[in-house]
Image (cartoon, helix red, strand yellow):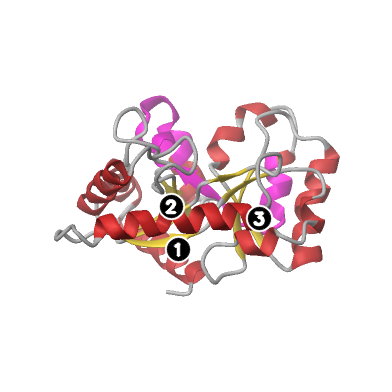
Amino acid sequence: MIDFHSHILPRMDDGSKSSEMSVSMLEASYEYGVKTMVATPHFYITHDTADKFITRRSASYDALKSHIAQHSAPLPDIILGAEVYFFRGISKYDGLPKLAIGDTKYILLEMPFERWPEKYLTEISDITEETGLIPIMAHIDRYLDFQKGTDNIERVISMGLPMQMNAEFINAFFTRSKALKLIKDGVVTLLGSDCHNMDNRRPNLGQALGIITKKCGGDTVDNIISESKRLLGL
C-alpha cells in the first residue's frame, strides 16, 4: 500500500518533531502494510519560497536517512513531495514544479476550509493549463461540509483530478458509509493517513484497508494500489 499523504519528515511543520518520532511512524506504517510513503510537509507561500522549502526539506530528509541507516528493521520507502496550500496566483507561480511529488507531474493541493468562490475553481483549472501539473486534491473529505449547498465538489470531480481521502474518514463510524460510497463510485482513488505524530494523528491506514476490504472487496484495494503506483510511476 502507498500512503499518499504524510507528515513524517522531522521538524518540517506541525508533523514529526524528531527523527526518532519519524522512524516510529515509519515502523507503524510498515506494520500496516504500507510499503511507500509520500512525505508531504506543508508548503505555505506566506512562509517559504519553493527554493527555501526544498532546502529545508532536503536537510530534514538527510537527517532522517542518517537515523534510518542505524535501523535494521524494514521501513517504507519515502518519496518527497509537499502539501501545497492554495493561494491566488498559484497557477502562475514559477516555483510550483519544484513542489511536485517525486519525479511526477502531480502536486498535492490543500484547499482553504471555507466555501470556495468561483475564482478558486478557475485557479485550480488554470494550474494544469499554465504549468502542466495536475493537482491531487488533498483530503477531499475535509471540504465536504464547507461546500454544502454548492456544486463545487462536483465541479472539481468533473475536472478529472485525482482525489485523496484521509483514512480517518473511513475509520470513523459516522462518516464511514459516505467514505465508502466515494470509493465505490470511483471518486476517491488515493488514500493517505495524514499522520503527524504517534499520538492523536498517528499512522492509521491499516484499519481503513481492513474496512475497505470487508465492505468493498479486495479488488477495490488492489485498484487503489494500482492507481497509486501509476501516478508515482512505480
Amino acid marked by disc 1: Ser
Mark 2 or 1 closer to N-term? Answer: 2
Whether residue 197 appears in this view of the structure is: yes
Extent of the magenta region:
153-179
Q: Main secondary structure of the magenta part?
A: helix
- The residue depicted at 81 percent of the width and 35 percent of the height is 117
Q: Is residue 200 above or below residue 165?
A: above
Q: Position of residue 182 (x, y in %)?
A: 51, 45
- The residue depicted at 32 percent of the width and 42 percent of the height is 203
Q: In terms of secondary structure, where does tag 3 sit?
A: helix
Q: Position of residue 138 (x, y in %)?
A: 56, 46
Question: What quarter of the picture does the C terminus occupy?
Answer: bottom left
> Foreground mark, 3 or 1?
3
Distance from disc 3 to disc 2, alpha carbons, whole Å, reads 15 Å
**Circle number at residue 50:** 3
- The residue depicted at 34 percent of the width and 41 percent of the height is 18
Question: What quarter of the picture does the N terminus occupy?
Answer: bottom left
Q: Quick check: 128 left or right of 144?
A: right
Query: Which residue, given by chain and number where applicable, does mark 1 sit on?
Result: 228
Distance from disc 3 to disc 1, alpha carbons, whole Å, reads 25 Å
Query: Which residue, given by chain and number where applicable, does mark 2 sit on?
Result: 60
User: How many neighbours does mark 1 have within 10 angstroms: few (below 14), some (14-19), or many (20 or more)?
Assistant: many
